[in-house]
Image (cartoon, rainbow, N blue to C red):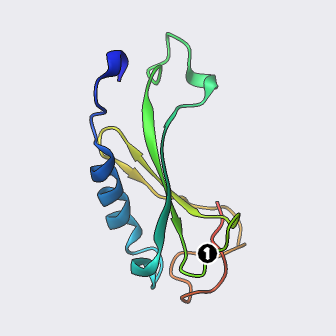
Amino acid sequence: MEGGKNPPVQPGKAVLLARRAFAGEFPDSATWKIDSLSIEAYPETVQHLASPLYDKRYYVVGFAPPEYKPAADHYPVWVLMDGTVVLPRPEGATGVEPGAAPNAAPPHR
């Protein structure tokens, strides 16, 4: 994305890919809204010239459940600039797990 070029995956395509991947995560996933969309850089720990991830970006698409309340957690989905989608795989058993009953509890990161 150097020199002001468009990203390899356009924002609309990133949202479409994220929504498709998210569709199987919760029984009511079709009712979830997108509450955030951003392009982020890989963490500073890999931002040195020798890193293969130097100057690489990815999308974060945040989904909010239908009963979403401001400041509540959302469910992030990452879309890499090659179109690969990464879903969160939380450690532990807190919050809503994929496949849980609709409208259970707010999701976690």
Q: Which residue is mark 1?
A: 68
Residue 23 horizontal/vertical position (percent): 37, 73
Q: Which residue is depicted at the point 66% across and 64% down?
A: 73
State the residue in front, 68 or 53: 68
The amino acid pointed to by label 1 is Tyr
- Left or right: where does residue 17 sit relative to residue 46? left
- Left or right: where does residue 14 sit relative to residue 93? left
Give neighbour class at mark 1: few <14, some 14-19, many 20+ (Cα, 10 Å). Answer: some
User: How many numbered marks appear?
Assistant: 1
Furthest toward the top, the residue is: 49
Q: Which residue is depicted at the point 28% across and 30% down?
A: 6
Residue 41 horizontal/vertical position (percent): 51, 31
- Specify the quadrant that holds the N terminus: top left
Q: Identify whether 95 is placed above or below 41.
A: below
Residue 56 horizontal/vertical position (percent): 43, 27
Q: Identify whether 93 is placed above or below 71.
A: below
Q: Residue 69 falls in which quadrant of the image?
A: bottom right
Q: Identify whether 50 is placed above or below 74.
A: above
Furthest toward the front, the residue is: 70
State the residue in front, 44 or 10: 10
Q: Which residue is depicted at the point 60% across and 30% down?
A: 43
- Left or right: where does residue 26 sit relative to residue 23? right
Q: Which residue is depicted at the point 63% across and 86% down?
A: 104
- Specify the quadrant that holds the C terminus: bottom right
Label 1 residue SS: loop
